[in-house]
Image (cartoon, grey):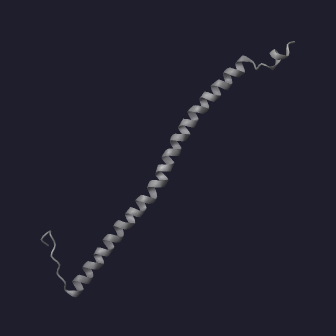
Amino acid sequence: MDTAAAMDPPLEGVCLLAHLRQARRGQTEEMNSVAVVVLIVLLALPLVIVGIGFVWAAIHDGEEDRAVQRRLGIRRKTRLGR
């Protein structure tokens, strides 16, 4: 028996390996897509939370300002004609 022929992998095994590599490429692309979505969510979520915090603080501060002005009798004119 020829030693070179004995070392060659069978043809079916080569086709199987090529098929597995192709399947892994598809999984890799899907995993990359999932990773990008997870990264975007992880970056956007804190920004949204901080934004909501700023809006809440501004509303809360405005309420306090109006309460102090009401208590002191300060009437402020606004552009809205109020």
Residue sitting farthest toward the left: 81
73 w.r.t. 81: above or below: below
Residue 18 x %, y %: 65, 24
Residue at the location (38% across, 63% down)? 52
Residue 40 x %, y %: 47, 50
Residue 50 x %, y %: 41, 63
49 w.r.t. 2: above or below: below
Residue sitting farthest toward the top: 1
**Dividing the image into 4 quarters, which one contains the N terminus?**
top right
Residue sitting farthest toward the right: 1
Residue 34 falls left or right of residue 51: right
3 or 12, nearer to the observer: 3
Residue at the location (85% across, 13% down)? 2
Query: For residue 44, which quarter of the picture?
Result: bottom left
Residue at the location (28% across, 74% down)? 62
**Dividing the image into 4 quarters, which one contains the C terminus?**
bottom left
